[in-house]
C-alpha cells in the first residue's frame, strides 16, 4: 500500500513531534540502553574525525528548530539547467537508491513533514530544495536538497540530471549518500561512490533504517537498544569503511569523509528528536562551514559524545 505524505497542506505544517507523540519508555530489561541516551559514538563510526560534542549537537538542533521562515521550500527542478543560479547559500544534497529513506530523513532533519515519502520506490521525481535557518526577507543558512532515487523505479534522465548537478553546482558543499543498513552497498551505490571519487565530489555516507539492525522489529526497538544490537551496528560500520574510503594508493580519487553516520528516521527519541538525526544535522552544518564559533554559541572545550 502507498502511504503518501504529506496528504494535504494541513499536514505540510505538521511537526514531527505531533506525528510521533513521545511515549515515556520504561525499560524493564536492564541489558538495554534507552534510545535517547545513545550518543553518536554508539551509533556512528568516526575514524578521521571527532564525534560532535553535546554542545555542538545542541547548537545544531537549535538551528533546525522549525520557525515561520524555516524550513522553506525554495525550488524544484527536473533539469539541472533550470536550477536557480543566483543563490549563494551553501547546499548539501541527499542521494541514494530509491526507497532508501532520503525524504523521510530530511523530514526528520527539518522537524516537519515537508517532503513527500512513500513505501513505493520512485516517489521523489525532481530535485527539491529547502532553506534552513532563514529570517524574514533574509538568506538561509544552508539549503538541503532531496533528490530522486536511483535504481528501482528511477529514470535514466534523472541520473543524468543529478550527475550534472553534482559536477556543476558551485554551491554544493557535500553530497550525503544514504545506504540501506539492511541491504548494504549494492552495485549502483558502488558506481556512484566511484563517480564521487573520480570527480572529487565531497561526500559522506549515512546508513539508513538502522532500527532493522539494532532490534528485531519496531516493538523491540521501542524498549531500547541491546548491547548486541549496538555491536552488530558497529560491525556493519567497520565492514563498510574500506568500501567508502578505499586505500588511496588503489583509488581513483578522494574517498568519502572518514566518518559514517547512521539514522532511523521513524524512531523518535525525545521532543523534536529522532534517532541519529542530531549527528546528521551537525554534519550538515560542518559541511556548510557553520560551526557555532562565529555565533559565539559554543564553549572552547567540551567533551566528545
Ligand atoms: N524501518 C524503517 N523504515 C523507514 C525508515 N525511513 C524511511 N522508512 C520507510 O522507507 C520507505 C521509503 O521512504 P522514503 O523516505 O520515501 O524514501 P526515498 O529514499 O525518499 O525514496 P524515493 O523518493 O522513492 O527515492 C517509506 O515506507 C518509509 O516509511 C527507517 O528509518 N526505518
Ligand atoms: Mg524521496
Image (cartoon, helix red, strand yellow):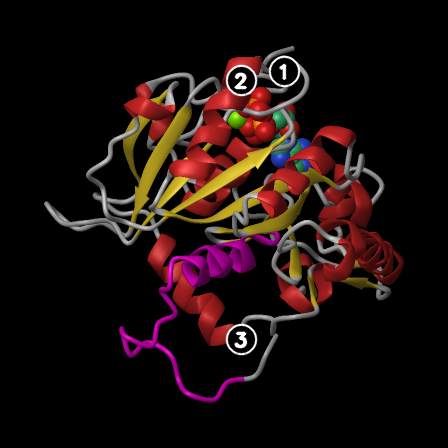
Residue 17 drawn at (x, y percent): 46, 44
The secondary structure type at the circle numbered 2 is: loop
Residue 69 drawn at (x, y percent): 21, 44
Q: Which is nearer the eye, 63 or 29?
A: 63
The question of residue 291 being in magenta is answered with: yes
Ligand 1 rendered quadrant: top right
Using residue 40 as the reference point, say whether residue 73 is left or right of it: left
> Which residue bears the numbered disc 3?
53
Q: Which is nearer the eye, 111 or 218?
A: 111
Residue appearing at x 77%, y 38% in the figure: 185
The secondary structure type at the circle numbered 3 is: loop
For the N terminus, the image quarter is top right
- For the question of whether residue 16 can be seen, the reply is yes
Callout 2: CB less than 8 Å from ligand 1: yes
Query: Range of the magenta residues?
Result: 275-302
Question: How far, Cα to Cα, is label 3 from label 1?
Answer: 37 Å
- Give the dominant element type of the magenta stretch: helix, strand or loop: loop
Q: Earlier in the sequence, mark 3 or mark 2?
A: 3
Question: How far, Cα to Cα, is label 3 from label 2?
Answer: 35 Å
The question of residue 7 being in magenta is answered with: no
Q: Which is nearer the eye, 80 or 63?
A: 80
What crowding class fits label 2: few (fewer than 14 Cα within 10 Å), some (14-19), or many (20 or more)? many
> Which residue bears the numbered disc 2?
123
Residue appearing at x 64%, y 65% in the figure: 40
| Rendered position, 16 above or below 155 | below
Q: Quadrant of residue 187?
A: top right
Residue appearing at x 45%, y 38% in the figure: 167
Per the rendering, the mark at residue 44 is none
For the C terminus, the image quarter is bottom right
Per the rendering, the mark at residue 120 is 1
- For the question of whether residue 20 can be seen, the reply is no
Amino acid at each position: 500500500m502507498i502511504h503518501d505524505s504529506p496528504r494535504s497542506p494541513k499536514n505540510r505544517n505538521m511537526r514531527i513531534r505531533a506525528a510521533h507523540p513521545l511515549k515515556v519508555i520504561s525499560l524493564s530489561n536492564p541489558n538495554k540502553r534507552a534510545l535517547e541516551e545513545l550518543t553518536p559514538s554508539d551509533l556512528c563510526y568516526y575514524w578521521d574525525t571527532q564525534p560532535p560534542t553535546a554542545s555542538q549537537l545542541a547548537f545544531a538542533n537549535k538551528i533546525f528548530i522549525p520557525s515561520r521562515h524555516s524550513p522553506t521550500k525554495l525550488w524544484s527542478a527536473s533539469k539541472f539547467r533550470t536550477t536557480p543560479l543566483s543563490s549563494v547559500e551553501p547546499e548539501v544534497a541527499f542521494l541514494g537508491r530509491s526507497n532508501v529513506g532520503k525524504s523521510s530523513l530530511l523530514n526528520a532533519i527539518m522537524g516537519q513533514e515537508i517532503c513527500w515519502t512513500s513505501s513505493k520506490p520512485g516517489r521523489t521525481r525532481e530535485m527539491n530544495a529547502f532553506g534552513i535557518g532563514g529570517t524574514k526577507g533574509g538568506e538561509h543558512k544552508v539549503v538541503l536538497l532531496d533528490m530522486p532515487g536511483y535504481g528501482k523505479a528511477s529514470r535514466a534522465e534523472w541520473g543524468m540530471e543529478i550527475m550534472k548537478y553534482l559536477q556543476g553546482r558551485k554551491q554544493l558543499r557535500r553530497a550525503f549518500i544514504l545506504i540501506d543498513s539492511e541491504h548494504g552497498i549494492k552495485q549502483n551505490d558502488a558506481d556512484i561512490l566511484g563517480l564521487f571519487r573520480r570527480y572529487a565530489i565531497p561526500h559522506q555516507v549515512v546508513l539508513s533504517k538502522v532500527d532493522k539492525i539494532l532490534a528485531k522489529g519496531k516493538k523491540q526497538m521501542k524498549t531500547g537498544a541491546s548491547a548486541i544490537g549496538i555491536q552488530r551496528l558497529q560491525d556493519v560500520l567497520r565492514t563498510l569503511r574500506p568500501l567508502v574510503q578505499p586505500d588511496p594508493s588503489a583509488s581513483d580519487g578522494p574517498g568519502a569523509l572518514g566518518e559514517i553516520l547512521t539514522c532511523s528516521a521513524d524512531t523518535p527519541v525525545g521532543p523534536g528528536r529522532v534517532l541519529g538525526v542530531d549527528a546528521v544535522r551537525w554534519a550538515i552544518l560542518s559541511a556548510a562551514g557553520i560551526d557555532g564559533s562565529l555565533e559565539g554559541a559554543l564553549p572552547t572545550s567540551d567533551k566528545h559524545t
